[in-house]
Amino acid sequence: MSIAAPAAGRLDPFDLLEIDALLSEEERLVRDTVRGFVRNRVLPGIEEWFERGVFPRELVAEIAQLGLLGMHLKGYGCAGASAVSYGLACQELEAGDSGFRSFVSVQGSLSMFPIWKFGSEDQKREWLPPMARGELIGCFGLTEPDFGSDPGGMRTSARRRGTDWVLNGNKLWITNGSIADLAIVWARAEDGIRGFIVPTGSHGFTARDVHRKISLRASVTSELVLEDVVVPASALLPGAQGLKAPLSCLNEARYGIVWGAMGAARACYEAALEYARTRVQFGRPIAAFQLTQRKLVEMVVEIEKGMLLALHLGRLKDQERLRPEQVSVGKLNNVRAALEIAREARSILGANGITLEYPVIRHMNNLESVYTYEGTNEVHTLAIGEAITGISAFR
Ligand SMILES: Cc1cc2nc3c(=O)[nH]c(=O)nc-3n(C[C@H](O)[C@H](O)[C@H](O)COP(=O)(O)OP(=O)(O)OC[C@H]3O[C@@H](n4cnc5c(N)ncnc54)[C@H](O)[C@@H]3O)c2cc1C
């Protein structure tokens, strides 16, 4: 990233509304540290990882050293950072690539959070410290081949056998699936939906990667198959009862997306602005044409609005006042805006915009997944619709 300081007297094109001034010194430090990590360790390799379709597992230890795994959780070796700091970290990671933000979201918000929130004291002590150190990787198995937006229909079952549990079923589209050491598996038991910590080395557990993705290529996505997987009673998350438990984890993760999407959008805007200033057609830089300026202005206005929205939701979260429907507003707006920004940026880059030499089409393709996972655009629309009308339109 080459965000240059503005010329004297000019507004900063990357901080038009001076949102920077709304952050504390500590928050800026977190942001700048993660930005530096992305510049030095992610950007030099990302084109190749994306092209080869691999997640660079070797960077996990460094991500952990920065305190980014379970960053917003308190105790058990976690950094205990504020929600705003966590959001800023997500923003910077996703300015690198959505795959990195996805890794951190799944580890911290979807794998560590359920243990932290619903686990027993023994489970927290056993799993959270090595996960915060990046020694153990987690994944979150909720979606099934036939149940995506409607996870309440899940078929994966949990049956008691003596004091053990026997798990059977299939989970699909599971981030980190084949590189995970443990899976948080949601299954239907006699008393409703329950969550289990399942070591991926368990007999009967297999993870197969989804291939031929053209989105989130620098992220592992897998299918999990559980065939008579036996886990002890101590694998059950005692505090997780019913669908609201996994949904509360998703709410944590999509809070990070509200910020992350704006990171991807900023990277696209930056690439487009730089390109428009230097690409000459008809004897002038294309930034001199009114139509190009309009595109750039729409981008920066949406980014500034999206960042203010993320910051507002972050402050509410730090005051423990943030409601799921408010997170839906942020996810719906910011991912939609980011996707539009990526598409406009792509058009400014012309033919160059379709190559991996520039980050734009990579972000654009990644954002298609971000638009769908953690609640689709439509599902968040209906969640907000229900909040304002009092009527559920899901069925
Ligand atoms: C890269 C990637 C990573 C993922 N990682 C994970 C993970 O780690 N763990 C996990 O459990 N899942 C994961 N998912 C799955 C993701 O959460 C689901 O894809 C998502 O919930 C949507 O489900 P679906 O794809 O089955 O689409 P469907 O639910 O089949 O939806 C298809 C379309 O129908 C629309 N639709 C559905 N119901 C309604 C309705 N009532 N009203 C209006 N429109 C509706 C949807 O909005 C969408 O446009 C991941 C997905 C991707 C792409």
Image (cartoon, rainbow, N blue to C red):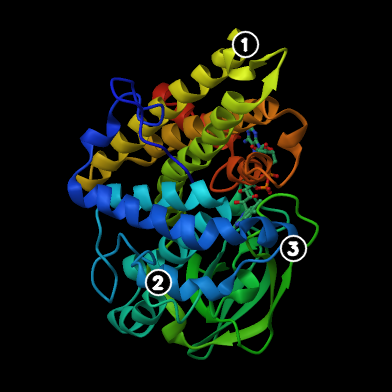
Count of numbered badges drawn on the protein: 3
3D distance between C-alphas at marks 1 and 3: 36 Å
Instruction: Tell me what residue is drawn at x 40 percent, y 52 percent.
Output: 35
Residue that sits furthest to the right in the current view: 212
| Residue 184 badge | none
Question: Which residue in the protein does label 1 denote?
Answer: 291
| Residue 64 badge | 2
- Is residue 156 placed above or below 300 in the rendered structure? below
Could you say where residue 309 lies in the image, as x and y percent from the top left? 35, 31
**Badge nearest the viewer, 1 or 2:** 1
Could you say where residue 46 lies in the image, as x and y percent from the top left? 62, 57
Front-lying residue, 141 or 26: 26
Question: Which residue in the protein does label 3 denote?
Answer: 52
Q: Is residue 231 something one can see in this rendering?
A: yes
Q: Is residue 382 something one can see in this rendering?
A: no
3D distance between C-alphas at marks 2 and 3: 24 Å
